[in-house]
Image (cartoon, rainbow, N blue to C red):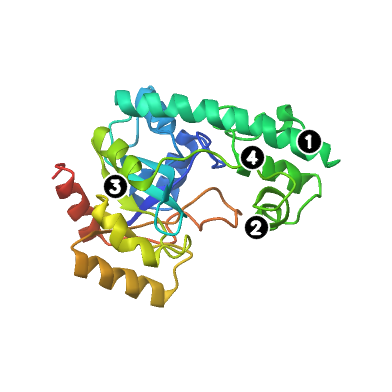
Amino acid sequence: MTERLIDLHAHTTASDGLLTPSALVARAVDVGLAAIAVTDHDTAAGVRELRAGPEGPPADLEVIAGIEISAYVDVGDRDLHALGYFIDPFAPALLRYEEERRALRTARLHAIIALLRAASIDITVDEVLAQPGGDSAPGRPHIARVLIAKGYASSMSDVFKRVLGKGGPGYVPIEKPEAAEAVRLIRESGGLAVIAHPGLDDLDLALDALVEKGMSGIEVFHPDHDAAARERYHAYARRRGLLVTGGSDYHGDGRKDGGALGGTPLAPEHLEALRRAAGRA
């Protein structure tokens, strides 16, 4: 019998994924997942949508309520993504945070579009909002998709490097919480805070500080971590007594950010440890 897979990092149209929450769940069943965590950027709206649906998640698929908070760490001023697991998607602190982020994202969207149009790049706010998830949590990935479709860039990495990243004509910084604030938000929402893809975000020198700020775990298994990185982070987790997580960072089939759903699985014992730590044994 084929072992059923566990994937604790996936996105929906509630943020920058291509599949709706229900379509993601259906895709998870198709690929044979036993458990999936819905970890949209700065929102748990996708989880709430699943719970409010007439049928709810399938009985043979565990859907874990999660989130991925965009933050920074004050060690080298590095970008940080903090994964939260087993959160309460209706927690008042989380709902307040989501409302604040939505306002910031919307203001940033209009500022970026104004800069791009001033640079003779033909793009409108309406085109961005029409992208999957663009109306609920508009962000740079939604802008990037429009730019790629119009031929202004060849890929997501290209558009972020030349157009939307630092030094590009459409770069607009956005206010983000510091790591300790992100941890506090996740804890106030009933969840466990985990460092997302430290290799991708070049966080090795900040790991000790992040643990001191309250991170309970580290994402060891990620498509952008090679074998050496996985061993390094696994050893660090053992040394610091951290929980180990992993997942595909799935955004949709054919997307180059992240990997294939179920393609970076997590061993069941790590999910059990996470569940125990969250008081969900």
Position of residue 39 measured from the top left corner of the image (x, y, whole percent): 40, 43
In the image, which disc is placed on residue 157? 2
Q: Amino acid at mark 3?
A: Ala
User: Disc 3 to disc 2, how far (Cα)?
Assistant: 27 Å
Q: Amino acid at mark 1?
A: Ile
Asked whether the residues under the numbered discs 3 and 4 touch, taking CB atoms below 8 Å apart as contact, a structural biologist would say no
User: Disc 2 to disc 4, how far (Cα)?
Assistant: 13 Å
Asked whether the residues under the numbered discs 2 and 1 touch, taking CB atoms below 8 Å apart as contact, a structural biologist would say no
Relative to 27, is 7 above or below?
below
Q: Which residue is mark 1?
A: 123
Q: Nearer the viewer, residue 91 or 149?
A: 91
Position of residue 133 measured from the top left corner of the image (x, y, whole percent): 57, 33
Report the side of 133 relative to 231 (left or right).
right
User: Disc 3 to disc 4, how far (Cα)?
Assistant: 26 Å
Residue drawn at point x = 65 percent, y = 52 percent: 166
Q: Amino acid at mark 4?
A: His
Q: Amino acid at mark 2?
A: Ser
Q: Which residue is mark 4?
A: 142
In the image, which disc is placed on residue 193? 3
Q: Nearer the viewer, residue 21 or 127?
A: 127
- Name the residue at the bottom extreme: 228
Q: Earlier in the sequence, mark 2 or mark 4?
A: 4
